[in-house]
Amino acid sequence: MDFALSEEQIQIKNMARSFMRDEKSKEKQVENWIKNADKTKKFPVEFMKEAAKLGLLSIDIPEEYGGAGLDRVSALLAFEEIAYVSVPFSLDILVHNSLSAFAINLAGRKDQKEKYLPRMASGEIFGCFANTEPDAGSDAKNIKTRAVKNGNKWLLNGKKRFCTNASASKVAVVFARTSERKAGSPGTTAFLIDIGPRVKGYSLDRLEPKICQAGSTLCEFSLNDYEASDENVLGEVDKGWNVCGGTFEHSRIWIAMQGDSLAQHAHDEIMKYASERTTFGKPVIENQYIAFELAKLKIEIESAKMMAYKAAWQEMTSNPEFAVTASMAKYMGGELAVKATRLACQYAGGISISQESIFSKLYADALAIPIYEGASEIQLAIIAKNMKSRSALT
């Protein structure tokens, strides 16, 4: 296996790094947008518009629809740089790309792709993904939102919760029950619908107050006799789980890298602090116990990144092991983000309690990563199921 990056991949990675770290911006645009999001808690429209100009909103969109058309590994290289600087801004880009745009490209008809993907690629509109409900989180197949056929229309009724960035989005991939759940058939259908304050049958109910990841909004919305047609069906009726499950598998490697990048950022910050901070007459890093723990953490971070890139390569090559590797990568990334940021807080000492401290911010941002896109326990269940099936074949 060749671990060397191509010239194009190096350019993609450097482009994303330069943008996120304001290397070519005297105004420090990204830094200021992050500070503003921390204060206002609002979705960073200006950041997303600028990211669109660089092709970062079209990572998962084919070139024929105005997208960047990146391979999976190249996409992850760019995303690694985005997540290192800002977890919430990376989540904004992730939801737009690896959830909504990917789902449309995965299951959409040509007319659906032509209608939405070019506008999403340019940043004209943003997309979101809505499956979670007040009573359906980890049990993602147990949704209550219903779509009932009424003549040539579908009437959608229900409530969606924890839908990232619905407040800023104009299009949503929404899942609704179209038949009863039974063994082997969740009975759900994916719909591709327009949303917004002037859309009949749609209402944004609330923005969830959050303790972390300022700059991405967590929304709850309702559908009340929302009229859709067969043209809004994404994929096939009653086959919505194919869209939902396939999208989750793809998106998990992005979340994995999000966690890995956050862990790397925490490691870099504590290394810098421990090298400058002195206790008992010497830098903190010269304490062998701390140095060894940070060395072990570095090994874990590099291992987790390799797992994420392996999953990306497997997806790109249609390897049948992709799904379970994606779950392993997501588990590693989520757990490692919390471990690395907690350790950084511990070694930084009292300063990590300050709200202005980078350590407290990174730790707070890490807390959600083992939860969304399938909690760590769900990933372990997927991995265990795969182990059992493989064992049964031997």
Image (cartoon, helix red, strand yellow):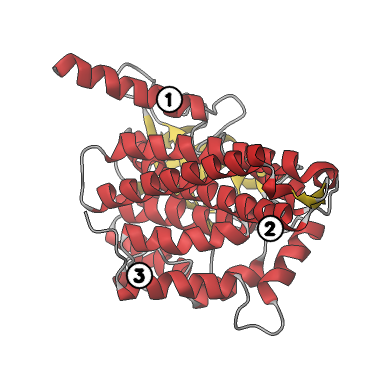
Q: At 52% from the left edge and 40% from the top edge, which residue is drawn?
A: 296
Q: Amino acid at mark 2?
A: Lys
Above/below status of 111 relative to 267: below
Horizontal arrangement in the rendering, residue 365 relative to residue 36 (left or right): left
Query: Which residue appears farthest toward the left when viewing the image?
Result: 394
Residue 241 occupies which quadrant of the picture? Answer: top left
- Quick one: label 3 or label 2, which is nearer the N terminus? 3
Q: On residue 9, which mark appears?
A: 3
Dot 3 surroundings within 10 Å: few (below 14), some, or many (20 or more)? some
**SS for dot 2:** helix
Q: Nearer the viewer, mark 3 or mark 2?
A: 2
Place of residue 151 in the rendered image (x, y in percent of width and height, measured from the top left): 39, 39
Q: On residue 393, which mark appears?
A: none
**SS for dot 3:** helix
Q: CA distance from mark 1 to mark 2?
A: 34 Å
Task: Give the residue pinned by disc 1.
Answer: 380
Place of residue 192 in the rendered image (x, y in percent of width and height, measured from the top left): 43, 50
Q: CA distance from mark 3 to mark 2?
A: 28 Å
Q: Amino acid at mark 1?
A: Leu
Place of residue 306 in the rendered image (x, y in percent of width and height, measured from the top left): 37, 48
Horizontal arrangement in the rendering, residue 159 relative to residue 29 (left or right): left
Query: Which residue appears farthest toward the front when viewing the image?
Result: 281
Q: CA distance from mark 1 to mark 3?
A: 32 Å
**SS for dot 1:** helix
Q: Are marks 1 and 3 in contact (CB under 8 Å)?
A: no
Q: At 76% from the left edge and 64% from the top edge, which residue is drawn?
A: 35
Q: Amino acid at mark 3?
A: Gln
Quarter that holds the C terminus: top left
Q: At 75% from the left edge and 58% from the top edge, which residue is drawn?
A: 276
Task: Give the residue pinned by disc 2.
Answer: 272
